[in-house]
Amino acid sequence: ARALLAKRNAVLTATIDAAAAQAAAQAAAQAKAHAVITVLVARGLAPAPGQRAAILAVRDPEAQERLLIASATCTDVERLLADAARAP
């Protein structure tokens, strides 16, 4: 493997780059989900364990962005999740 890396093998470097991009996307998704939870907790709306799991399970970046924005003004977590489930 070292020899292929030293030669900058196209297949190997593409695979490594794809894995790095996927890891970065997963880290960003996890950070956004934690941001939603942090906003809710700061507002006194700490999610229950099941609600927390539901927030962490959202992987679509657009859905996560909607959750984060809505978390700033929602009145309860159950409603936040219900509204998110109905969103496009």
Image (cartoon, rainbow, N blue to C red):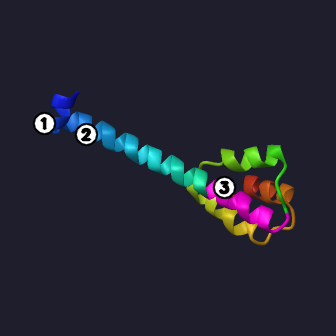
Disc 3, disc 1: CB below 8 Å?
Answer: no
Which residue appears farthest toward the top when viewing the image? 1
Residue 22 horizontal side relative to residue 62, left or right: left
Q: Is residue 63 visible?
A: no
Q: Which residue is denoted by mark 1 in the rendering?
A: 7
The residue depicted at 81 percent of the width and 44 percent of the height is 49
Q: Is mark 1 on a helix, strand or loop?
A: loop
Q: Is residue 73 visible?
A: yes
How far is the residue under mark 2 from the one under mark 3? 31 Å
Tell me the tag on residue 13: 2
Quadrant the C terminus occupies: bottom right
How far is the residue under mark 3 from the one under mark 1? 40 Å
The residue depicted at 39 percent of the width and 44 percent of the height is 20
Task: Please provide percent x and percent y for residue 10.
Answer: 19, 38
Q: Is residue 19 above or below residue 76?
A: above
Give the amino acid type for the residue marked by disc 3 in the picture: His
Q: Is residue 83 above or below residue 2?
A: below
The residue depicted at 45 percent of the width and 50 percent of the height is 24
Q: Which of 59 and 38 is in front in this view?
A: 38
Q: Quadrant of residue 44?
A: bottom right
Mark 2 or mark 3: name the one nearer the start of the chain. 2
Give the amino acid type for the residue marked by disc 2 in the picture: Thr
Give the amino acid type for the residue marked by disc 1 in the picture: Lys
Span highlighted in magenta in the image: 32-44
The residue depicted at 85 percent of the width and 55 percent of the height is 78
Q: Which residue is denoted by mark 3 in the rendering?
A: 34
Tell me the tag on residue 28: none
Residue 83 horizontal side relative to residue 25, left or right: right
